[in-house]
Amino acid sequence: MSTVALMWEARAVPGRGNELLEWARSRVLAQEPVRREVFRAPQDRVLVITWWETPGGVSDDLPELPEPEADLITRAVHRWRFESVGAEGPGGS
């Protein structure tokens, strides 16, 4: 099994960051990921990372958050997919 992280990042229209944050939190995916975290950043940006266990690594069939309504965001959503190549604990071990 491989661990895959999907990253979804959007930038809200100025002043609507909280609305975008709530929008992202309320989205239900077709499957539940192993883990899901939601982050906020300056300039009304929202980042969602989901972790998945897959038999063959990065795959196009994992569910992702959709695009929000066009009037809520300033640009198209950015998306990245990563496959884990190992984890390190505290102290680099």
Image: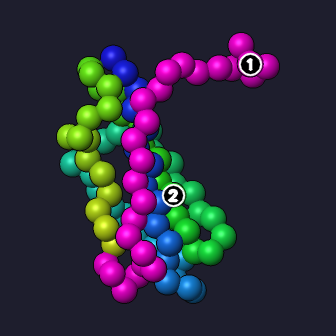
Q: Which residue corresponds to the image point at 32% horizontal and 57% vertical from the top-left? A: 65
Question: Tag 2 or tag 1, which sits nearer the N-term?
Answer: 2
Q: Is residue 19 visible?
A: no
Q: What residue is shown with label 1? A: 92
Q: Position of residue 41 (x, y in %)?
A: 63, 65
Side of 77 where 85 appears, left or right: right
Q: Is residue 62 visible?
A: yes
Q: Position of residue 18 (x, y in %)?
A: 53, 76
Three-letter code, disc 2:
Leu
Asked whether disc 1 touches disc 2, contact meaning CB atoms under 8 Å apart, the reply is no
**Crowd tier of the residue under label 2, counting other residues whose Cα lies within 10 Å: few below 14, some 14–19, many 20 or above:** some
Query: Which quadrant of the structure image shows residue 22?
Result: bottom left
Q: Position of residue 32 (x, y in %)?
A: 30, 42
Residue 82 among magenta residues: yes
Residue farthest to the right, as pictured: 91
Side of 36 where 15 appears, left or right: right
Q: Position of residue 56 (x, y in %)?
A: 27, 22
**Crowd tier of the residue under label 1, counting other residues whose Cα lies within 10 Å: few below 14, some 14–19, many 20 or above:** few
Describe the element under mark 2 as helix, strand or loop. strand
- Looking at the image, is 30 positioned above or below residue 43? above
Locate the C terminus by quadrant: top right
Q: Which residues are magenta?
A: 69-93
Spatial separation of the CA atoms under disc 1 and disc 2: 26 Å
Residue farthest to the top, as pictured: 93
Three-letter code, disc 1:
Gly
